[in-house]
Amino acid sequence: SSIWTNVPQGPPDPILGISEAFKRDTNPRKVNLGVGAYRDDDGKPWILPSVKKAKEILINANLDHEYLPTEGLNTFRQAAALLAYGNCPEVAEGRIAALQALSGTGALRIGCAFISRFYPHNKIIYVPKPTWGNHKNIARDAGLEVREYSYYCPTKKGLDFERLLSEIDEAPRNSIILLHACAHNPTGQDPSHEQWAQIHEVITRKQHLAFFDTAYQGFASGSTDEDAYGLRYFVKEKSPVLLAQSFAKNFGLYGERIGLFTAVTDSSAETDRVVSQLKILGRAMYSNPPLYGARIVSTVLNTPELYRQWQQDLVTMSGRIKAMRSALVEKLKEKGSPHDWSHITNQIGMFAFTGLNAEQSQTLMTRNHVYLTLDGRISIAGLNTKNVEYVADAIETVTR
Ligand code: PLP
């Protein structure tokens, strides 16, 4: 018998498995609302105009393909940190320790590995319930204990805010608390500014460590400042934070794997020590990060004209998504749906948490060829002016 006889078949990834099923479906009306990737009104991937211009600049510069250092491309690291944290003393004083990472996932993984190796307290991470499907895998594989705090109330179709506060309060002192910086995935529900202050209060009082995950900065509201509100509030209040940044959605650079892990430190000397250890972690995992996408992001962020174009691109994407939220709700009303669908327009970001149960979601897939995750999450980016009526009709039918 072979060495691997006892390796069991693993379950398919719940999100990527849906794309597989979608591909197999031969019905011409099929709609993929499963995967979280932006599509234009023709249902096609969109190359941001700012990114296109940056690529032209890079081609003309005829650059080489040498290795990046393990910490990544310097101009990218600095511009990305500034984008997240804004103009603040921490940035100016060299108190942001940064490692370029393999997109948001890699930044989370490096962060969890850093916690696992150096965090001087219990290595327990609390993630919201529900959360992006990969958070628990990432934290667990890095050796952390994963627990959950309540986040969403299905009956209210909004934040379960009192329980969120009390459960973060009850977590053992010095726990790590994972927070979605904006566009919470999958619920589309973000804390208000006042609620961020309350979350900050309990985290500080319990001496927890906030680990922000920002996968949608600028993509959610159209404003990179607004989408950084929670993170910057913590930093302004002098609370320690960790941050995992992704440039997949806000630059449309999904497959280029561009991200950044950062930790706010007490001094530039501490920054140097932390970076030296982040490099040791990265060196053993993948040696050094991707060059091309980092050059693209760096060129956009560091060229004023392209930066302005990028801000417009963000408004284009977030605006189309907001328009599709309204169109879906309007069509549902037109179809005579008796339900209140206002949560769909109140939510923000790539996804809507429709409230459809697993059975209804399954029916949408098998009977209507509309693909979504079984928790009722739909990617609004998969909607367009040509399919929104069909999707509304299907949703109306399964919720009748
Ligand atoms: N965090 C959240 C909340 C996400 O939704 C995603 C992507 O869907 C990621 C992180 C990481 O994505 P990537 O590794 O492609 O940057």
Image (spheres, rainbow, N blue to C red):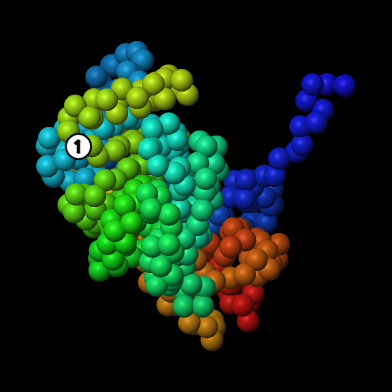
Q: Mark 1: which amino acid?
A: Asp
Quarter of the rendering occupied by the C terminus? bottom right
Q: Residues within 10 Å of mark 1 (few under 14, many from 20)?
A: some
Residue 275, can we see it? yes
Quarter of the rendering occupied by the N terminus? top right
**Mark 1 beta carbon near ligand 1 (under 8 Å):** no
Residue at 38%, 53% (x, y): give it: 173
Residue at 32%, 43% (x, y): give it: 242
Residue at 39%, 72% (x, y): give it: 162
Q: Is residue 344 left or right of residue 250?
A: right
Q: Is residue 6 left or right of residue 208?
A: right
Residue at 40%, 50% (x, y): give it: 175
Place of residue 216 in the rendered image (x, y in percent of width and height, measured from the top left): 35, 50
Figure label count = 1
Place of residue 327 in the rendered image (x, y in percent of width and height, measured from the top left): 42, 71
User: Which one is nearer the viewer's eye here, 2 or 386?
Assistant: 2
Say if 239 sits above or below 196 in the image.
Answer: above
Place of residue 149 in the rendered image (x, y in percent of width and height, measured from the top left): 47, 60
Residue 368, can we see it? no
Place of residue 185 in the rendered image (x, y in percent of width and height, measured from the top left): 45, 56
User: Which one is nearer the viewer's eye here, 240 or 173?
Assistant: 173
Residue position marked by numbered label 1 in the rendering: 266
Say if 318 sits above or below 139 in the image.
Answer: below
Quadrant in which residue 56 is drawn: top left
Quadrant in which residue 396 is drawn: bottom right
Say if 103 sits above or below 390 in the image.
Answer: above
Q: Is residue 360 left or right of residue 271?
A: right
Q: Secondary structure at mark 1?
A: loop
